Image (cartoon, rainbow, N blue to C red):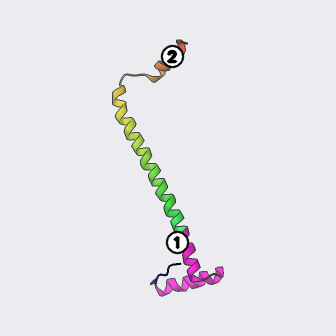
């Protein structure tokens, strides 16, 4: 396992000690758990942002295709094909 040096304010250190004492775990383990939780949330937000970008791109594509289909009525087209059966 890698090692790092971490500088934090005295108040944050006291809070870290309090939480690690309440959870009965070491400071290191508490920090590792906090990093895991942060990474999970970070990944979740990143996936959501990518999903939104894909949706925006799909909308841009639809908008660009729409100009080629002016005057075309999808409902009429479906009815025409149904009646042709």
10 inside magenta stretch: yes
Mark before the other along the chain sequence, 1 or 2: 1
Disc 2 crowd rating (10 Å Cα; few below 14, some 14-19, many 20+) is few
The dominant secondary structure in magenta is helix
Residue in the foreground of this view, choosing between 41 and 28: 28
| Residue at the (45%, 23%) spot, across then down | 74
Q: Which residue position is annotated with label 2?
A: 81
Secondary structure of the residue carrying tag 2 is: helix
Secondary structure of the residue carrying tag 1 is: helix
Q: Number of marks in the image?
A: 2
**Residue 12 image point, x, y percent:** 50, 83
Left or right position of 63 against 51 = left
Q: Is residue 21 above or below residue 74?
A: below
Q: Is residue 17 above or below residue 66?
A: below
| Residue at the (46%, 58%) spot, across then down | 46
| Residue at the (41%, 45%) spot, across then down | 56
Which image quadrant: the C terminus?
top right
- Judged from this view, the residue extending furthest toward the top is 84
**Residue 64 image point, x, y percent:** 34, 35
Tell me which corner region of the image, top left, top right, bottom left or bottom right, holds residue 29: bottom right
11 inside magenta stretch: yes
Tell me which corner region of the image, top left, top right, bottom left or bottom right, holds residue 63: top left
Q: Which residue position is annotated with label 1?
A: 35
**Residue 36 image point, x, y percent:** 55, 69
Q: Which residues are magenta?
A: 8-36
């Amino acid at each position: 396992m890698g090692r790092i040096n971490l500088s934090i304010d005295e108040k944050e250190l006291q809070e870290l000690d309090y939480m690690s004492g309440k959870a009965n775990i070491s400071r290191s383990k508490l920090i590792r758990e906090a990093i895991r939780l942060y990474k999970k949330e970070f990944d979740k937000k990143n996936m959501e942002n990518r999903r939104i970008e894909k949706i925006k791109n799909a909308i841009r594509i639809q908008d660009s295709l729409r100009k080629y289909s002016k005057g075309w009525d999808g409902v009429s087209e479906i009815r025409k094909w149904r009646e042709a059966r």
